[in-house]
Every structure is written in C-alpha cells, then in structure tokens.
Image (cartoon, helix red, strand yellow):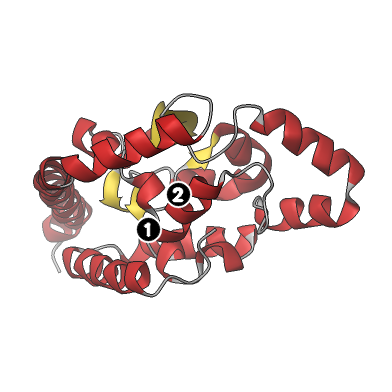
Amino acid sequence: MSMREYASAPSHTYYIKHSFQLYLRLYKRTFDLLFSFCVLILFSPVFLIISLAIKYSSTGPIFYSSLRMGKGGKPFKCWKFRTMYKDAEQKLARLLETDPALKKEWDTFFKLKNDPRVTNLGKWLRKTSLDELPQFWNVFKGELSIVGPRPFLIDEIEQCVCEKKEKILSVKPGITGIWQTSGRNLRTFQERLYLDERYVEKRSFLYDIYLIGKTIFVLIFPKGAY
C-alpha cells in the first residue's frame, strides 16, 4: 500500500461506516412509519374498546405516560394504557417499606410479579401486552422504534445503567427487542442490560424482522409478561 493509499484508508473506512449507519437509520425510520401507521389505523377499534373498558372499570385516566430516555439521552413521554389504580405510587412506597421480600424482588427486577397496584383489567392487558399499543404513537412520532432496547426510566439510566449508558442510548429504544422475546420479567435488570447491548451490536434489517416474528410468537404464547 502506498503512503497516499494508507493516508486515505481511514477516511474511506469512515465513509463506508457512516453510509451504512445512514442507510440503517433511513430504512428503520421508513419501516417504523409504515408499520406504526398501519397498526394505528387497523387497531383503532381495539383502542376504542380498551379505552372504554378502562374508563368504566376503575377511576383515573385512560392513558398513562412516564418520562423515558430516548436516543442520545433525549427524554420523551412514553404512552401506555393505564393498568394501575390511581394511587399506585403511594401503594408501592408503603409496600416496599413494610415487606422485605417485595423490596428484594423490586430491587432485582424493578417489577413485582403479584403487584397489588395493578387492576384486574390491567393484569389482562399486561399479560397480552395490549397495554403497550399506544406506544405505536411514539413510534409514529419518531421517539421509539419498532425494534430496539427497552426504553429506560431516567432514574434507571442514572442509577443503574452507568457505563453502558452511551452504548444503549446510541440507538432509539423500541417496543420490542431481545429482552421482550427472551423471558421479559423473568430476567434480572442486569440480564436486561446485557441483552440490550447485544441488540446494539447485532442490529440489522434481517435481525429486526427475526425479532418481530419472535414477538408474534411470544404474544400468542406469553412468557414472563406481568
């Protein structure tokens, strides 16, 4: 290799890498727009039925939003159908103060398997993952992707993700991904981080299609959803 070729090699490699990343972003955004638009239109009757069921089964709003960390550390409101009672946060604080076993479960999984805060309808919505249908609006707006790492709460990013933060936040979070199709809440928080890192490293068009197909299977035969 001549000196001139050697000098130009790094910039050529950077150009190829940059072009690939640009292509990946463009394809994902196009796919996300088309997929989310179709879901929002085709499932609009389901949205209406669930909304009415929530409205008349418990006190509180139909939708619930929580502040999540998006790509590049940009926060956004992540939407779901409400699955908990109105005073859910106060109930959680009391439970964790008085029950050491539940406190240990919460610290390990950031979830409670038999969560008393969840309504009866909410348990079914979570089991079927229908509570996450409103997140397709987040996808349509460009805040989420169909496939990606699970969106983290801001407190989770600051307290638990630490040195993995830059890598995981280098891509858009997604509605589904490796964690959601690999046991979900049966996984510890640290295992979830590992799976999110794996997605960032392996992401491609074919891998996204594979995970979407796996998600459909998991929705029919749910495991670890609560």
Residue drawn at (56%, 33%), measured in percent from left and top? 154
Amino acid type, callout 2 = Ile
For label 2, the crowd category at 10 Å Cα-Cα, with few meaning under 14, some 14 to 19 and many 20 or more, is many
- In the displayed structure, 29 sits above or below 24; it is above
Q: Are marks 1 and 2 in contact (CB under 8 Å)?
A: yes
Question: Residue 35 placed where, x, y %?
Answer: 13, 49
What residue sits 34% from the left and 34% below the top?
52
Q: Residues within 10 Å of mark 1 (few under 14, many from 20)?
A: some
> Which residue: 40% across, 46% down?
131
Position above or below: 85 against 168: above
Residue 44 image point, x, y percent: 17, 40
Where does label 2 land, which residue?
168
Residue at the spot of label 1: 200
Could you say whether the residue bearing mark 2 is in a helix, strand or loop? helix
Amino acid type of disc 1? Val
**Left or right of 199 on screen, residue 197:** right
Q: Assign the N terminus to one quadrant of the image.
A: bottom left
> Which residue is at the far front?
56
On the picture, is 167 further left or further right than 52? right
